Amino acid sequence: MDRLPANATRFDADAEALAERIPDGALLALPPDYSLPAMAVVRALVRRRARNLRLLGVPVLGMCADLLIGAGCVAEIETSAVSLGEAGLAPRFTEAAERGEITVRDATCPMIHAALQAAEKGVPFMPLRGVLGSDLVAGRPDWKVIDNPMGHGDPILLAPAISPDVALFHARWADRSGNVWLGRRRELMTIAHAAKATLVSCEALREGDMLEDELLAPGVLASVYVSAVAEAPHGAWPLGVAGAYPVDDAHLAAYARAAKTREGFARYLDEWVLTPRKSFSPA
Amino acid sequence: MGPYAKEELLACVIARLVGDAAHVAVGAASPIPAAGCALLRARGLPLRVSLLHKRSANPFTDGSRELFDLAGQGRIDVFFLGGAQIDGEANINLVRAEGKRLPGSFGSAFMYFAAARTILFREEHSRRVLVPRVEFVSAPGWSPPGVWRRGGPQALVTGKAVFSWHRERRRFRLESIHPGYDLGEIRASTGFEFDCAAEVPATIGPTSEEITMLRGPVRREIALNYPEFARRVWAQQPEAA
């Protein structure tokens, strides 16, 4: 594996500036809707007309991916699922997949975690139990089955290490030292450990260094992994930040209805994404 | 159906199947399995229920991989899976069916192997869902000898019936039919072959004690994570103590 960088965290002005750092064609790792998605940056990516992104869902995706796919930003997606949860199917993903407009590389959740854990450790693969006999395996020539070298006659599946070009997520806090508080959302730490660059939008920038606080430190992603940070208050909206604000279920349901058609989706983009002043919750 | 909602009957069926498990994990959008587990807890059983998408006080602190690690360690006794299609060999399909793209396999391809038991649950009981052969195997119902597999299907619960799974025969067996349906209806709406006794009993409905618990503590617990479901099922019922 190439060397991953020891970062000196940059401080950007806003979500737009973070979006500028994500090149077209990048392998972009994103969290599920329930785990701190950087929606303000996702909207900025749509506005900057990002193209040919390859999304990696860690391990599943929702509105975040549906918006990028509908806006034509995505060429390929690797994920264990795309869904709007209680709001139903992700309509732009569903249509793009059915029409073959995007390449879908179907996975299963722990294979994606294992692939990132391999990159996190700098090893070429990570074995995982189960999965054998699933049609997923036939669709993934990059997944290998070997005979367990610690036993015999025991086939086991290997997940090849994945090192995303960019990991992108939102956080409640970052500090002036470049540390990011993620709390219990530790899959985001794994993504950041595995990624070549990590971009984080946050609700608020704190003074000082969170690593000096024994209560905060266990939930902190250290700045060595963090490429750039920008403040984006309400930056996960219409999704939520645990302990700060809940998911805007009504908005999500309205999105699910609107995005059922291309026209409805275009109207949604006009109203909520392409017009910057309305691009975050008025609440 | 008796003086209870179908969801209440299904929650009781699930509770009986979960039985004396110590740890059950319940995935997203599974209010009926969650209600079945809540019913066991309301009876005072020391059942640990990990709701994967619990909005607050989520049981995991090591990220979304912790569930899979727990299952890999063997710490999960019962898991629930559904499927856009389920076939007679207990294979499930969450990827594509009838030309339609579905959300995807989630963690099924691992959890079906690693959890000690899996209860398949799908309310719709039709030939569209219960098919001779799934179009895509997200997770296989059985594995050949030599392939590591801790667990597999225990039962299939639908809106019309309960089937048990017989690993040696690789077939489902019809155990009971919910009130309001008969064997002819089950055969007509099931796309795969299954075993069944000469006389198939009716699914046992909730006792009055179970109804009281469902409309009291279970309802309150479920409303926290599945408010829409709780309103739909219990809005017309006076809340029990």
Image (spheres, coloured by chain):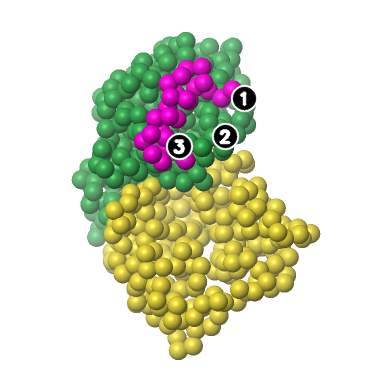
Chain colours: A green, B yellow
Q: Identify the residue shown where x is 56% and y is 38%.
A: A249
Q: Is residue B54 left or right of residue A136?
A: right
Q: Are marks 1 and 2 in contact (CB under 8 Å)?
A: yes
The chain to which mark 1 is attached is A
Magenta stretch bounds: A256-283
Please state which amino acid type lies under the numbered disc 1: Ala
Q: Are marks 3 and 2 in contact (CB under 8 Å)?
A: no
Which of disc 3 and disc 1 is earlier in sequence? 3
Q: Position of residue A19 (x, y in %)?
A: 39, 18
Which of disc 2 and disc 1 is earlier in sequence? 2
Which of disc 2 and disc 3 is earlier in sequence? 2
Callout 3: SS: helix
Query: Relative to residue A145, is residue A12 depicted above or below?
Result: above
Which residue is disc 1 drawn over? Answer: A283
Query: Relative to residue B81, is residue A177 depicted above or below?
Result: above
Please state which amino acid type lies under the numbered disc 3: Ala
Which residue is disc 2 drawn over? Answer: A248
Q: Identify the residue shown where x is 56% and y is 25%.
A: A281
Callout 2: SS: loop
Q: Identify the residue shown where x is 27% and y is 32%.
A: A75
Query: Relative to residue B175, is residue A248 depicted above or below?
Result: above
Q: Measure the alpha-carbon separation of dots 1 and 3.
A: 21 Å
Which residue is disc 3 drawn over? Answer: A258
Q: Is residue B126 left or right of residue B43?
A: left
Discs 3 and 2 carry the same chain letter:
yes
Please state which amino acid type lies under the numbered disc 2: Asp
Question: Looking at the image, which residue sits at the far left?
Answer: A141
Is residue A275 in view from this perspective? yes
A272 falls in the magenta region = yes
Q: Position of residue A170 (x, y in %)?
A: 49, 26
